[in-house]
Image (cartoon, rainbow, N blue to C red):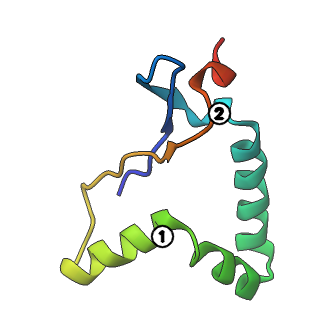
Amino acid sequence: MALPNTFSARTADGEWRSIPCEREPLFALAAVAATRMYHDGPRDRFRAIASRASIVNAVSQALDQVDSLEGGSMGGPAFNGIPAELYSD
């Protein structure tokens, strides 16, 4: 399954804009921390945090319906209340 590499945020005029995940500074830090925790532990803490994520919940629900998610893809999250202009070039 291909995970999202973009997220959406709304512009001041109400239009949704797709933004690369790398533009969100906390995403990059969280990805590094999650990777380290997954590989080096503590795994129980990683599991507890990951199980609260909406993306993990969506994947879990999809797997309840089918045997495999091979070839599937998932859209990125939409950030309500965070202006897209915050991420402009």
The N terminus sits in image quarter = bottom left
- Measured from the top left, where is residue 80 in percent x and y? 54, 42
Q: Which type of secondary structure does the marked residue at label 2 adopt?
A: helix
At 61% from the left and 28% from the top, the residue drawn is: 83
The answer to whether residue 49 is left or right of residue 59 is right
Judging by the rendered image, the residue that carries numbered circle 2 is 22
Q: Observer-nearest residue: 73 or 80?
A: 80
The C terminus: image quadrant: top right
Of the two numbered discs 1 and 2 on the same chain, state the one appearing first in sequence. Answer: 2
Please, what is the three-letter code of the amino acid marked with disc 1?
Val
Residue at x-position 59% and y-position 39%: 81
Q: Most extreme residue toward the left, as rendered?
A: 66
Find the residue positioned furthest to the bottom: 44
> Which is nearer the eye, 52 or 70?
52
Q: Would residue 26 appear left or right of 52 to someone viewing this image?
A: right
**54 w.r.t. 4: above or below:** below
Which quadrant of the view contains residue 20? top right
Which element carries disc 1, helix, strand or loop? helix
Mark carried by residue 56: 1
Give the number of callouts: 2
Position of residue 84 measured from the top left corner of the image (x, y, whole percent)? 58, 25
Q: Residue furthest front?
A: 13
Where residue 36 appears, as percent x and y from the top left, is 78, 64
Category of crowding for the residue at label 1, using alpha-carbon neighbours closer than 10 angstroms: few (below 14), some (14–19), many (at least 20)? few
Answer few, some or many: residues within 10 Å of disc 2's Cα (few below 14, many 20 plus, some between 14 and 19): few
Q: At x 75% / y 44%, what residue is drawn?
A: 26
